[in-house]
Amino acid sequence: EILVRTLAGWVEQNGLAGKTVAEFACGEGAAGVILSKLGVRYRGLDIAPAAVEKARERLSDFPDARVERLDMVKERAGLPETFDAALDCMGFHMILTDADRDAYLANAQAVLKPGAPMLFFRESYRDNAYTGVVESFDHWKEITGDDYTTPQLRSYRDGADGKDVWIPFVPARARNREGDCTEMERAGFAVEKFMGMEESSAILYSVSIYARKR
């Protein structure tokens, strides 16, 4: 519900109906369905083939929606200044190293038109987040001491059916306000609003960041 309200307000405030909106790390297309119903020309991008396939199925009823496989750290989603706006929904915090985060933001900024808005929805946040450089995945494991190898029992819902699966803990890098804003401003974005979110089962502590290409 909060995602629907947030995207509806963002689309209206920025006049995005009929415009081309990219979603980086689109997952299985939930936000793509919402945006398509709001009248945007949707372009979903994700590195995971299974997620791309599922998103294409979900968006098959929307003729203006497209989903492609792309690694946003290593590739750009279009020519310079292709998109009128972009969305990252719980994706940016999954990138751990400073180099990869900088590359992702640079690639996102490059394909947006001048003045285009970008919304980072529900990104992991901590006031006391680690502020040093992260050089690699192994370095992050040393910093956190977390176990990303041993499977743990998790429950999830697939439609009306609940299922239990064994999967390892997935790494994510929380940032504080200064860390997020510094990265985005260095990449050529102006941060317009930094909004704390209510606690969620998806991410306990998170923020939504409203940015715009300078």
Image (tube, rainbow, N blue to C red):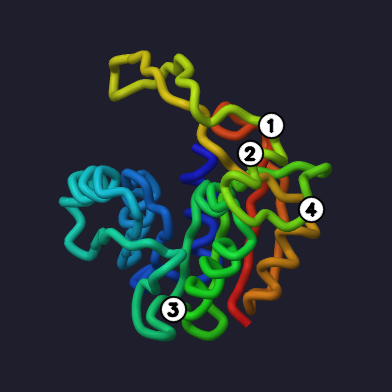
* Residue beneath disc 2: 141
Mark 4 lies on residue: 131
* Residue 54 location (% of width, % of height): 23, 43
CA gap between label 3 and label 1 equals 36 Å
Identify the residue at the far right of this view: 128
Q: Amino acid at mark 3?
A: Val
Of the two numbered discs 2 and 3 in the rendering, the one whose residue sits closer to the viewer: 2
Q: Position of residue 129 (x, y in %)?
A: 77, 45
Q: Position of residue 46 (x, y in %)?
A: 35, 55
Name the element at disc 4. Answer: loop
160 left or right of 96 in image: left
Amino acid type of the residue tagged 2 in the rendering: Lys
Labels 2 and 3: the sequence-earlier one: 3
* Residues at marks 1 and 4, CA–CA distance in whole angstroms: 16 Å
Earlier residue among tags 3 and 4: 3
Q: Secondary structure at mark 3?
A: loop
**In the structure shown, which secondary structural element does the residue marked by tag 2 occupy?**
helix
Q: Are marks 2 and 1 in contact (CB under 8 Å)?
A: yes
Q: Nearer the viewer, mark 3 or mark 1?
A: 1
In the rendered image, the vertical position of residue 177 relative to residue 211, given as above or below: above
Compared with residue 165, is residue 3 higher up or lower down, i.e. above or below? Answer: below
Residue 199 in view (yes/no): no
In-image side of 162 versus 133 (left or right): left
